[in-house]
Amino acid sequence: MDFAYLQDLSTIDFELRVLILRMTGDIEHALRVRFNNLISRVNEDGYQVIRDYEQDQRAFYARNGKAYDPDGDYQKSIYTTGMIRKYLDSKPVWLFWETCTLNSLIRCYQSFLQHRRFQDPTYSLLYGVRLLRNAASHHNCLLIPPSEQVRPTRDLNYLLRLLLTDETETTDMTLRLAETDPLIHDFACVLLAHANLVKSKGMRSHVVEQINSFLTRMQRHEDWYRNPESGCDHLIGQLDAIRLLLSSIVEFNRKRDDDVLTEEQKHILAQPDRNPVRHGRRRASRQARSGRNPSPSA
């Protein structure tokens, strides 16, 4: 490939990473907000949330023949060491949120969902978000042919079909790549998680501006790669899929702000819901059957 091609592609790859870091930063913040709102919704004890999480982690590590260090989830730095030293003994949930990695945050959120019987349609997207955030933050080149097959995310195909409403060859190709190409799979996870989690119109508007700027830059020398002699068939497929995904999310946000989403498209915004508890008459507790008053729950 000509040096000018490589230079142009390097710039596109860099600007894509910048966009990804912006969106995944929004997602990480919004996930903490959602987590906090769910804890408040069920009047949960934040300390118990951490105790449950640590118990789950110990069991997970034990199954793999390893020991779990709960203090290792708290990332110490010049900005966090003071608060960690002050509050680590009691471990309030806010301390965990302030100092944990995105991976630990996702695992703790999973523990909370399971223990409190919540279902969040966005949860399955978060691992793709984490993988792409890590790749972008470590300045990995993204626009490369995949060396491994991706493990499809449970809800991604369903949500993508709600987002990509036009029946075209590019849509079909994008759906196929989302099942096979790690970049397209994880990038779709980022876009859909951002749409679901980020409620601030201002934050979404700034991202749309950045998307439009990136799309303009991406197409500046598009004809170079479409030359049949360039040998860039897979790259063209990736770029076409990225363009379709980005233009579709821009249009989705426009319809969202104008309140004209279809009923099907609104499923992309579905919020966490709690699984129904036992139906029918509930059996009295052992304490009630013995005539003793139960102690207040934590």
Image: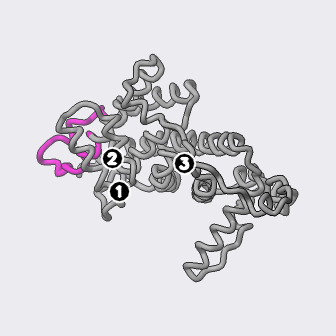
Q: Tell me: 243 left or right of 108.
A: left
Q: Tell me: 94 left or right of 133.
A: right
Label 2 secondary element: helix
Q: Considering only vertical position in the picture, is 145 above or below 224?
A: below
Label 3 secondary element: loop
Q: Quarter of the image containing the C terminus? A: bottom right
- The label shown at residue 171 is none
Along the viewing direction, whichever of 12 and 195 lies nearer the viewer? 195
Q: Earlier in the sequence, mark 3 or mark 2?
A: 2
Q: Tell me: 263 left or right of 295.
A: left
Magenta span has 229? yes
Magenta span has 94? no
- The label shown at residue 152 is 1
In the image, residue 191 lies at what x, y percent?
43, 40
Q: Earlier in the sequence, mark 1 or mark 2?
A: 1
Along the viewing direction, whichever of 50 and 106 lies nearer the viewer? 50
Along the viewing direction, whichever of 180 and 155 lies nearer the viewer? 155
Q: Main secondary structure of the magenta part?
A: helix
Image marks 1 and 2: residues in contact by CB distance under 8 Å: yes
Evaluate whether residue 218 shows in this view: no
Q: Earlier in the sequence, mark 1 or mark 3?
A: 1
Evaluate whether residue 234 shows in this view: yes
Magenta part of the protein: which range?
219-240
The residue where tag 2 is placed is 157
| Displayed quadrant of residue 166 | top left
In the image, residue 110 lies at what x, y percent?
57, 56
